[in-house]
Image: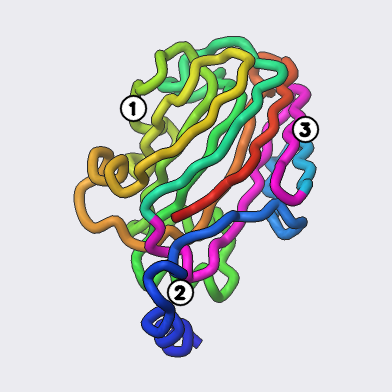
Amino acid sequence: MMKVLATLLILLPASAMARGAVPFDGTWERITFPFQTATRFTEQGEDMMIEGDGSVSIAWRQLDPVFWQADRASWTVDILQSVPATDLSLKGGDDRNLSLYFVFAGDDTAARAQRGASLARVLRQDDVRVLLYVFGGTAARGAQFDSPYMDGKGRVIIKAPAEAGTFSEDVDLAADFAQAFSGPRGNLIGVALSTDSDDTDTQVRAMVSDLTLR
């Protein structure tokens, strides 16, 4: 199967590769946690509505191989109701309105993901790195720090502190990866969305629209 995929990637013109919308089409996997209330993710084609009530969950989508070499991403976020500001650099008590995860991995882990490996298993692999674009917290836009949950594999990039508003983003994944990590970037194998309002037992309402890779 991987040889067929590799052949298809070679035959595709560059303009057709690593480009296009990532739809919210009912195929995103919901990941919940024991003893935690689940966040509601509602897929609406170009939009994902997110409703959290003292809850925490992740919505995860594995990407097709044509997206694996994408080096830019764009999207719009509407934060309709915000959680309070918390210190996201500390483990525990760190609620946020939204995180967008871009998950990168080497060829072996990418192949394993294609065979159906779970997000939890993927994140345990040594070659995985994650860029987390975050809306929430106390830090100003542009602040960066290691995720306290990922043992050096995840880098948090603040796009907005904890506040309501509309934010249109266009990020350079390749440049941000190079700044955050050493070594080769690997393949962009998946994207995920999460929100976290359980520690402050508050509500968050947000919508992600027009998620595009190129």
Number of marks in the rendered image: 3
Q: Are marks 2 and 3 in contact (CB under 8 Å)?
A: no
Q: Is 35 included in the stretch rendered in magenta?
A: no
Q: Name the residue type under label 1.
A: Phe
Name the residue located 31 percent from the left edge and 40 percent from the top edge: 176
Instruction: Tell me the residue at 29%/56% (across/down).
Output: 185
Precedes in sequence: disc 2 or disc 3: 3
| Residue at point 43%, 64% (across, down) | 68
User: Which residue, given by chain and number where applicable, does mark 2 sit on?
Assistant: 111
Front one among 171 and 191:
171
Q: Mark 3 or mark 1, which has the lower sequence index?
A: 3
Q: Name the element at disc 3.
A: loop
Region rendered in magenta:
45-70
Label 1: which residue?
A: 145
- For residue 201, above or below residue 58: above
- Please state the horizontal and vertical placement of residue 168, each as a whole percent of the image: 53, 30
**Seen in the image, is 174 located left or right of residue 68?**
left
Distance from label 1 to label 2 (Cα)?
A: 29 Å
The residue that disc 3 covers is 37
Which comes sooner in the sequence, label 1 or label 2? Answer: 2
Q: Quadrant of the C terminus?
A: bottom left
- Taking the image as shown, residue 148 lies to the left or right of residue 164, namely left
Secondary structure, mark 1, is strand
Mark 2 to mark 3 CA distance (whole Å): 32 Å
- The correct choice, above or below, for 131 with respect to 6 in the image is above
The kind of residue on which mark 3 rests is Thr
